[in-house]
Image (cartoon, rainbow, N blue to C red):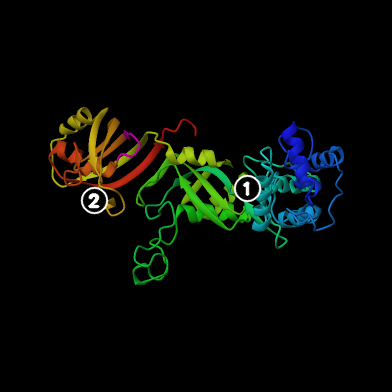
Amino acid sequence: MSGRLEIAGKALERPLCNHCLGRLFATVSTGLSNAQRGAIVRFTSAGISPLPRDRDCAVCGSLFSEVQKFAKLGVSASEPYEHSNFLVGTKIDPEVIEAEEQLWIDLDARETESIRSEMNREIGKVIEALLEVPVEFAKPDIVLLVDTMFDRVMVDVAPLFAYGRYRKHSRTLPQTRWPCRECRGKGCPRCDGRGRMYESSVQDLIGPVVMRHAEGEVDFFHGMGREDVDALMLGNGRPFVIEIRRPRKRSLDHGAMEREINACAEGIVEVEGMRESSRSELRRIKSAAYPKTYRVRVRFEADFEHRKLNDIVRILDEKPICQLTPHRVAHRRANLERTRTVHRMEIESIEAREVVFVVEAESGTYIKELMHGDDGRTRPSVAEIVGVACEVTELDVIHIEDKGA
């Protein structure tokens, strides 16, 4: 107690406003504002010290007299963005921060709170009352960064996320926008000036619709894995999350978006199950490793004994295979050896040299290479077991075992 009295006496020798005086004892008691603490210290200490005149506070220059102004600036800046909560941050003059820290050193004060923390709270309380929406510390829709030096407010808007599942009925459509490798999006002869390898993508048929409804600035597509450009995505569809940066609207009609996407995509892509999502679901989808089932049409280069197809099922069914990074993706992926398991291998149809397989395999299995062997980089393979080279003519993803994700 005597230490606090000594600090109070020394503090009152300086021109401090009640806020800056009270912050010296911020952790002493609860249920009081720093201004109230400062008033109590001022009027209970020996040698009563009057409040300094406007702009004369030795620490803040009476910055707290401008809280109402800062709050109104924050409200105005927030108006373009739909939000159900908010958070305030402040940028304080470095000279004010330095003056505060020097005061703590001079007085050996250890029960303090920073001016930035108090300013955040005081502005937040006023904005909360004006907007009638709560402050949110964990996941705010918007963060209002108040620059107290230049009377301006910057708005950081949390992204918006929408979940759905898509089916793709085209063999010339990539999942996401694919910038040209030569010009990196600038436009060149290789990409016919488009700046991208393909004219459109699944992302192009979904993202802009969601972005238009959310009135956002840019969209990002996050899928639970991806199929090859020439593969169809059928069955229960592939889960995805669309991320929209700086949305002005957050309450979206997901059913309306779904209908618009399906109408505009004209059967090339169709979506279902669209709903609100979150960053945590996005992370789960990106890291998911669920088995997938494929229908694969294979053409062998020569005649072979069809009884060898039974050997394929026997050797590969519920067996591990070793796969080095395929030649076709080696330019963008590390050359690693991966062990994957084929959970199920069935023969759906046989017609001369063409065979249709149904394969259920562990996530991350290179299915085309499982068929043709990739010059021995995948072992065992269908071609190795049969003893005849083959090529994949069609590949479809027909089911993703994601337990209703």
Residue 170 is left or right of residue 327, and the answer is right
Q: Quadrant of residue 308?
A: top left
Label 1: how many Cα within 10 Å (few below 14, some 14–19, many 20+): few
Disc 1 and disc 2: Cα gap in Å? 43 Å
Residue 43: x and y in percent read 87, 40
Q: Looking at the image, which is closer to me, 128 or 234?
A: 128
Q: Is residue 362 magenta?
A: yes
State the residue position of label 2.
327
Residue 88 visible in this rendered orientation of the protein:
no
Question: Which stretch did the figure color magenta?
Answer: 360-365
Residue type for callout 1: Ala
Residue 142 is left or right of residue 372, and the answer is right
Quadrant (top left, top right, bottom left, bottom right) of the N terminus: top right
Residue 135: x and y in percent read 71, 42
Residue 24 visible in this rendered orientation of the protein:
yes
Residue 203: x and y in percent read 48, 53
Q: Is residue 34 magenta?
A: no
Q: SS for tag 2?
A: helix
Q: SS for tag 1?
A: helix
Secondary structure that dominates the magenta span: loop
Which is more foreground, mark 1 or mark 2?
Answer: 2
The disc at residue 146 is none
Residue 283: x and y in percent read 48, 40
Residue at position x 32%, y 34% from top? 361
Q: Quadrant of residue 112?
A: top right
Question: How many numbered discs?
Answer: 2
Residue at position x 65%, y 49% from top? 101
Q: Looking at the image, which is closer to me, 93 or 80?
A: 93
State the residue position of label 1.
256
Residue type for callout 2: His
Residue 209 is left or right of residue 6, and the answer is left
Q: Looking at the image, which is closer to me, 107 or 214?
A: 107
